Image (cartoon, rainbow, N blue to C red):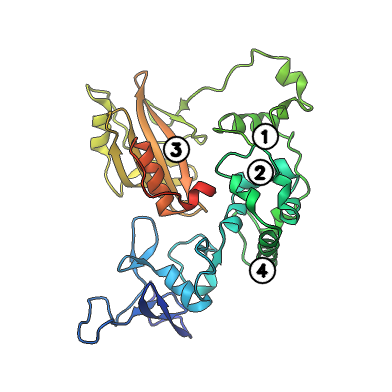
Amino acid sequence: MINTDEYYNEEKQCIYKNETYLVRNNGAVLRYPKNANKIRPLDNKWTFGNLGDKGYLYIAGVQVHRIVATAFYGDAPSTQHIVDHIDTNRQNNRPENLHWVTKLENALNNPITRKRIITVCGSIEAFLENPSLLGESRLDTNFSWMRRVTPEEAKISREKLEEWAKSDVPSLGGKIGQWIYKEQMSALNNMDKWKRIWKNEKESALPDDFFKMEQKTNYLENQNEEEIPDYVESLTVGAVQRNWRTPTEFPCCPQSIGDNPLENYLKNLQIGKIFSKNQYGQSKIIQFGLSKDKNTIAVQTYTEGGVKSLFVAKVTFENNLFVHTNDGSYFSDEGADKYYTLALGEEWIGGDVFDDYC
């Protein structure tokens, strides 16, 4: 582990949230005192920050990456901008690993969003050239904000994405340019996979007759086609998974049912403990709770790496099985908190969050 006085050759000063900081290009920050006669414990000390539950580094509750980005790149261009870690490592706060991005740019780096835009517009390039192509398409509410993207906003986003594509820094799954300029995707390829993906969407962005276009033989002729099971077996005995496509193990799941199954499950949960794990990684518990009707456990977790690393899951007891439902992945702490609250059946009073639009 490096020290705060290593691997840097530049220092910049900035003001962020009414605090003045000195920032090094190794990601270390020093907070100046507000009052020279009243030095606070964290004043005048170099630090990389303390690790929070969600993987970010903090100083006195303030995210260090936002301080570094402000020092080296200036204030956020708008309230809609967030700081993106280019290599997806939330503890790498060197300025060259950070950049301000808009919700449009961040959403376009989401594979589900890209597929939906391609389905409606034909290609990402076509959308960026003419955002009005979305028109009155049946995008669900999570993506309908894109209809309001102006040609000017799209042009700016496209130029920035092109800059990223020309850089040597790869995005998750390849250089960004590989999907911006990809040939028009054939939506009818891998039809069975598409049907399964979109059947599980709350409100599909596809037109009503999408699967009737050129696949009438297998899909429409068999009106009694077997429906996709509501849930599938997991890697844990007595546990199944819903909206959770990768076979997963749930270490906290009780091995016996007992008289109060969910309350027994709740006793096994602990902050920082592994909630789920599969071939792609593992998630650790941030917070958990039991709904007022005692029918649902809500669990918020964090997974290392990936664009969206915050998750919410629900656990219910159905047909003598512990059912684990994937309730979504989120960019922001606020988004994960909102949908965790809703999963508990409680009212969210925090208003709209960034993840409502991505």
Q: CA distance from mark 1 to mark 2?
A: 10 Å
Q: Amino acid at mark 1?
A: Leu
Q: Quadrant of the N terminus?
A: bottom left
Q: Earlier in the sequence, mark 3 or mark 4?
A: 4
Q: CA distance from mark 1 to mark 3?
A: 21 Å
Q: Nearer the viewer, residue 40 or 264?
A: 40
Q: CA distance from mark 1 to mark 4?
A: 34 Å
Q: Is residue 250 visible?
A: no
- Label 3 residue SS: strand
Query: Image point 28% across, 81% down: which residue?
Result: 34
The label nearer to you, 4 versus 2, is: 2
Q: Earlier in the sequence, mark 4 or mark 2?
A: 2
Q: Earlier in the sequence, mark 1 or mark 4?
A: 4
- Label 2 residue SS: helix
**Residue, disc 2:** 115
**Residue, disc 3:** 327
Classify residue 166 as left or right of residue 249: right
- Whole-percent x, y for residue 32 in the image: 32, 82
Marks 4,2: beta carbons within 8 A: no
The label nearer to you, 1 versus 4, is: 1
Q: CA distance from mark 4 to mark 2?
A: 24 Å
Q: Amino acid at mark 3?
A: Asp
- Label 1 residue SS: loop
**Residue, disc 1:** 206
Query: Image point 73% across, 15% down: which residue?
Result: 221
**Residue, disc 4:** 167
